[in-house]
Amino acid sequence: MLYAAFSTSPAITQWSLVLYSIIYTSVPTIIVAILDRDLDPITLLRYPPLYKGGQNDESYNKMLFWLTMLDTLWQSMILFYVPYLTYKGGDIDIWSIGSVWTISVVVLVNVHLGPSLAPGTGF
């Protein structure tokens, strides 16, 4: 079944697309990148086991990739169907539900980035 009201109208307005692309997704990532600190060369030479996880494919491997893909699929289904089923049968228009979807994605991105900014994580 198609969930696009059988029209070619996008659920997200053009301004929402621009703001989502530029501000909502890039700003949190840029903040994390700015606050991320590299280790100084003395620390890196003193603790060579810091590289061991990357060299042994323990940090990121095929299994973690597929788990991430499944997690992303699950999250996208939840973010789509929960608002859709909540407002189904109501008098909400397609652009309003699109705004709910956009806000849901923005909240999810910030929830994922939040722990990396928490105290005690190296910042």
Image (cartoon, rainbow, N blue to C red):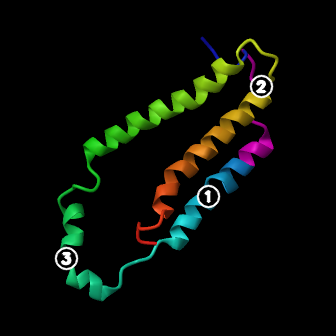
Q: Report the residue marked by disc 3.
A: 48
105 relative to 39 in the view: left or right: right
Residue 11 is covered by the magenta coloring: yes
Q: Residue at x 54, y 72 (%)?
A: 34
2 shown above or below 52: above
Q: Residue at x 53, y 32 (%)?
A: 76
34 shown above or below 19: below
For disc 3, the neighbor class at 10 Å (few under 14, some 14 to 19, many from 20) is few
| Residue 92 in sight | yes
Helix, strand or loop status at disc 1: helix
Percent x, y of residue 60 = 29, 53
Residue 66 is covered by the magenta coloring: no
Farthest residue to the front: give it: 119
Q: Which mark is residue 94?
A: 2
| Residue 11 in sight | no
For disc 2, the neighbor class at 10 Å (few under 14, some 14 to 19, many from 20) is some
Q: Residue at x 57, y 51 (%)?
A: 110
Q: Are marks 3 and 2 in contact (CB under 8 Å)?
A: no
**Range of magenta residues:** 6-18
Q: Amino acid at mark 3?
A: Pro
Along the line of sight, the residue nearer the viewer: 102 or 11: 102
